[in-house]
Amino acid sequence: MRVGVVANAYHPDVGGVETHVRRLVAGLTAAGDEVEVITQHASRSVETVESVLVRRFPLTVPARNFRLSVPLWRWLRAHAGEYDVLHAHSYHALVALCAALGNRAPLVFTPHYHGTGHSLFRAALHPLYRPIGRSIMARAGAVICVTAAERELVLRDFPEVGERAVVIPNGTDPRPSDPPPPSPVRRILCVGRLEQYKRVDRVIRAMAHLGPDHRLDVVGTGPAAAQWRQLAARLGLAGQVVFHGRLDDAAFDACLAQAAAAVSASAHEAFGMAVADALAAGLPTVAAPIPAHREVARLAGDGTWLRFTDPEDEIALAAALSEAAAAGRARPATLPSWDDVVGATRAIYAAVTGSPVSEAVSR
């Protein structure tokens, strides 16, 4: 099957959606599908990334939260019919609208839907954007949600989607589950795009209540990075809170192998990939009690070490982090794999296009 995957950004850009798209694309390619990624960037390029053709189109509107490439939209209008199916990602990015309008190619939509914006301004705009979102939902032959909690949000705001909304949980990558090497410092891992709604500042403030024998490793980039570095410095934690920025897979695995615990204070997630990856590695994990994190906990089942703590209570958060870091590695959670995601997604493609799913090639 020839698949066009339309995304707001793509590897080496990092984030939960970018990771989801990258892993899905790799799996589709391994299964024998011909996949192209159609995305937007500061400049135009066509390149092969990890055996996948990636078409990047220049931004017409470079605003961080409202990026839009008119050349991408024009290209899709002219070439969408060359694909058996288009798979667009992220309700919260205008690129999905480009995939939905101006062509009649079969469309699958994974909204990664949070139900609101991530700032007061964006939250105020969210109801105004809903008619545009509704046009994308209406065009999609299937809407793939990554949790039942996300599906409930989608159906709350777009009840007309109905049975076209299906749940395919995100996958997890095999991760090292051995205990970290002996060290006088217990390292706590915090992974994600550095946006205000991730609430990493709450974790930093909690670290002020822990001694120098605890260290916070922050992995990711984003617009709040400078502000949070300044916060750590003001609190006297410059050496206790380490910002790694973007890490490649090998460097991230090394960081994960040295971690004693993990934390996610995020206020909004469609899935909670950072929590899932931590549990899959056996890391004791502290998480905000949001619906997506609770659903990951149900998927992980008994035997994993996971504590839900309100990030607004920095004393309670510090206590939970200390307990997690002292607990030692737990049994790695058995969660859906990316092979599971790929298989279920290919079945959706077959249903939407009326084409049979071909057998996967051997890996």
Image (cartoon, grey):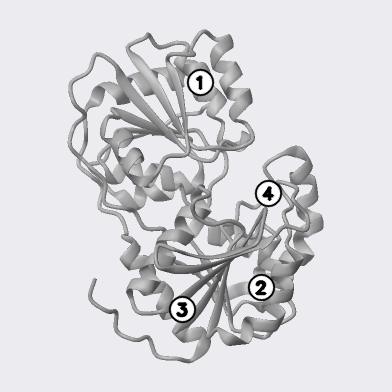
Residue 330 at x, y percent in the picture: 21, 36
Q: Earlier in the sequence, mark 3 or mark 2?
A: 2
Q: Dot 1 surroundings within 10 Å: few (below 14), some, or many (20 or more)?
A: many
Q: CA distance from mark 3 to mark 2?
A: 17 Å
Looking at the picture, tell me which residue is in the foreground, 194 or 155. Answer: 194
Between the residue at mark 3 and the residue at mark 1, the CA separation in whole angstroms equals 42 Å
* Mark 2 residue type: Ala
Q: Residue at x 63, y 24 (%)?
A: 227
Residue type for callout 4: Thr
Neighbor class of circle 2 (other Cα within 10 Å; few <14, some 14-19, many 20+) is: many
Residue position marked by numbered label 3 in the rendering: 348
* N-terminal-most mark, 2 or 4: 2
List the residue tagged with mark 2.
99
Say left or right for 332 vs 240. left
Q: Relative to 89, is 129 on the left or the right?
A: right
Residue closer to the observer: 241 or 62: 62
Spatial CA span between label 2 and label 1? 39 Å
- Label 2–label 1 contact, CB within 8 A: no
SS of the residue under disc 1: helix
Where residue 279 appears, as percent x and y from the top left, is 31, 42
Quick check: can you spot residue 147? no
Compared with 35, 42 (above or below) is above
Q: Quadrant of the C terminus?
A: bottom left
Q: Nearer the viewer, residue 234 or 142?
A: 234
Say what secondary structure mark 2 lies in: helix
